[in-house]
Structures are given as structure tokens and as C-alpha cells.
Image (spheres, grey):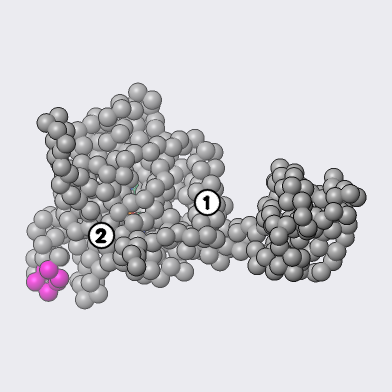
Amino acid sequence: MIKAIRGTRDLLPPETALWNFVEATAREVFRAYNFQEIRTPIFEATELFARGVGEETDIVSKEMYTWEDRGRAESDKGQSLTLRPEATAGIVRAYIEHKLWDRGLNKLYCIGPMFRRERPQKGRYRQFYQIDAEVIGPASAGSDSPARDAELLEMLATLLDRLGIRDWNLELNSVGCANDRAKFNEALRKALEPVVDKMCADCQRRAVTNPLRVFDCKVPEDQPIIEKLPRISQFLDEACRKHFDAVKEILKADGVEFRENDRLVRGLDYYTRTAFEFTHGALGAQNAILGGGRYDGLSEALGGPPAPGIGFAIGEDRLVMSLQETAENILRKPDAYVAPLGAGMNQEAARLARELRRNDLVIELGDENFRLKKSFETATKAGAEFILIVGENEVKADAFTLKNLATGEQVSVPRGELAAKIRAAK
Ligand code: HAM
């Protein structure tokens, strides 16, 4: 038997209803904040991620699905391509390619699969889904304002609340700007020198190439050493500190709770200033449901004009996991099972089912070849609330036998009152 590849999986009903609920709710919330959808390709030039996300990150150095694509003709040369491990780099590429700065401030969102060759475990897959949103534009459009950071975080709090996720924590930090980073990296190098030989091989490499990345280390033995390292919060310049303070002030005024965490540096190189994650207790080790931050130099790094931006990506797989508790309310079972009884009744039942579905009811339709007993069994298995019998007598009377499968109560209801009667029982 051929099975799905390790780290990938099928999403099956009824769980797919939860995915649809999450995406529909996200789209609704995005709309209220005037975000619009963008769709970018799921593979891009490898160089985009190397330059955008950073050569030294775990994502680029170990986790990308990259291949040499063959050209088909002189004009269609081969090149190195990569399945997108994240959405931000592609969206900023599109911003530059289509000169989206002409539109002022762009508020964009994108929903789709991402690919990372990570070690699969609960909440971590090699094909996973993100709901990603980005705010990007020229500074003259206000893209660098702390008001944008706070608005984005408030939108996330609203979305999680709307989804019925209660116990989330917002972890907030500022990772400063390029200036601060240079000083911080210098201090980190110094602090790492005497201890680095006790650390894992990855950290020994990071200490030389990009010391900030030691904060990505998950090796338990390295954690006490990392705990004692200097923090970026000690190196923020005046402008970065002011920006961070302003974000926090607005959040407090909004009533959005957060916790400052100065160890939070995020695993991608493009971040500047505000960086954040929302975590959820029920998720275990992979407890970040979403992460994001500001990336004020990314457009320039990709060859574009200055375009400050901020965004986030929700891990949809994890969000759906944290939602399982409320799943019962979302998964809609059929309201009624329409059971044709006897020859020629399929037509009558089909007509009735159509009427009821137009009244926004979920209807399962049976078959006249089923005996009454089998119709009952099928209706019960489908989880229908009612069974509705369509037999010759019912059609003549234009009133139908409606039986509540849970209570056993049975009544005869005129055609015109059926939809209201079924709805009233919900
Ligand atoms: P990220 O932190 O790498 O950020 O990923 C965001 C979220 O995607 C994570 O918090 C997690 O919920 C989910 N995620 C990541 N890897 C996996 C995986 N292997 N399996 C399941 N879920 C996963 C970014 O991707 C940035 N592009 C976010 C961003 C947008 N920053 C600014 N704009």
C-alpha cells in the first residue's frame, strides 16, 4: 500500500469542518480590519529564502525542500527552486515585483500550505498550513508606526477570542534594529567565548556566524548557559525603545494582555523591533500557535525600496488542535434525514429536500429502496436530529411524519410548516 509521506497527512471530515470554521472566521475578522487576500506561488527561487529568511537560520540551513529544476528550452533555464517554508518572503517579493507601494499601505493575508523538513511530532508537520497576514508600505503611509503593531496584535486577540480560544498568552519583545543588533552580537560573541565549547555543535557554529541564533537552540544541556547570556533588551537604542513603549501603551489601553519575554528572538533573520508569539497551554512542547513581528529592512534585502512592515503567521494545524474542545458546537450534523418510503417516492422526497435545504437546513436524503428500519439506522448513524417520512399517504395529505430521533416524539406537519418546526427544535 502507498501511504502519505512522513510528516504529511490527510485532513478528513469531520475535522475539515473545523478548518473551514477557522478560515471563515479569520477572513471575517480580516475584513473588519480591511485586509485583502493575496495568493503567491508555493515554490519560489531558492535565493529568495536564503536572502529573506537568512542562510544561518534552521529553516534555510536544514529544513527546505530544494531541487534543481530542469529547464525545457534555452529560454527556460534550469534553476534552484524551493517549496516555500513561510509566506512573508514571497509576499514581500510580490510587493516589490508589482510595485504595490503605489497603493500606500498594503494589508494582505494569505492562507495555504508551507513546507519544512522538521522532525515530525505532535503539532509539527513537514507540510503544514499558515494563515499569514502582512502590513507593508512606504513609511510615508504610516507603515512604521507603533499603531500598526498594536492594531495587528489587537486583531489577533480578537480573532482568538472569536474562535473561542480562551487561555492564550501573548509573549512580546523588541529585537531592535540593525544598529542594536551589531552591538548585541558583539556582546554575545564575547559572552559565548568562554562557554561555547560546552555547547552543542550547532551553537558552536552559530557563535561564529550569527550568535543571535543560539537562542533558537533547543538542546536541554545548553539552556542554563543561554539563560545567562546578555539580552537584546539591554541594547535597544532610543528610537527602538520608544517604539516598543508606544506599542505596549496602546495594548494596555486596548485591554490586550501580554507578557514581556526578552529571550524571544524568533527563528528568522528579518525581524526588527517588535517580535511576538501567542502560546497555548494545551499544546505541549510545540505550544506556539502563531508568531510574527516587524521586518523593516526585508524589502531592501530583497532589492526593493524601503518598506517597513509587520506581520504574523498562525500555525493552522496547531490552532485547530487547540480548538478541539469547542469542536462539538461547530460540527454541524444533519438537521433531518428525508426518508422516501415506497416506489416512486424518490421524486417527492427530492423535491421536499430541496425546499428544506433552501431554508438553510442540512438535509441527508435517503432512497426509496431502503426499508423503514434501514432508513432509521442510516439516519441515526448520520447523527440526524429528525427523520422525515415521505410515503404515499403523506404526499396525498401534503403533511409529513416528522420524528425526533432523540426523544422519539412523532408528529404530522404540513409541508409549509416543516422548516420552521425543524429549526425550532435546534
Ligand atoms: P514561524 O514562527 O516560523 O513564523 O511560523 C509561524 C507559526 O507556524 C508557528 O508559530 C507555528 O504555529 C506554525 N508552524 C511553524 N512550523 C510548523 C510545523 N513544522 N508544523 C506545524 N506548524 C508549524 C513565520 O513563518 C513567519 N513568516 C511569520 C511572520 C509573518 N512574520 C512576519 N510576518
Predominant secondary structure, magenta span: helix
Describe residue 265's horizontal placement relative to residue 111 as left or right: left
Any mark on residue 20, and which?
1
Instruction: Give how far across and how far down residue 399 sits, in percent.
Output: 87, 51
Could you tell me which quadrant the N terminus lies in?
bottom left
Instruction: Give how far across and how far down residue 395 sits, in percent.
Output: 85, 50
Magenta residues span 196-201
Tell which circle, 1 or 2, labels the residue nearer the N-terminal end: 1
From the image, tell me which residue sits under label 2. 117
Mark 2 crowdedness (10 Å alpha carbons): few <14, some 14-19, many ≥20: some
Residue at 25% from the left image edge and 74% from the top image edge: 220
Q: Residue furthest top?
A: 102
Residue at 84% from the left image edge and 58% from the top image edge: 401
Question: Residue 380 falls in which quadrant of the image?
Answer: bottom right
Instruction: Give how far across and how far down residue 86 sits, in percent.
Output: 31, 49
**Amino acid on which disc 1 is placed:** Asn
Question: Residue 195 falls in which quadrant of the image?
Answer: bottom left
Residue at 24% from the left image edge and 29% from the top image edge: 305
**Amino acid on which disc 2 is placed:** Arg
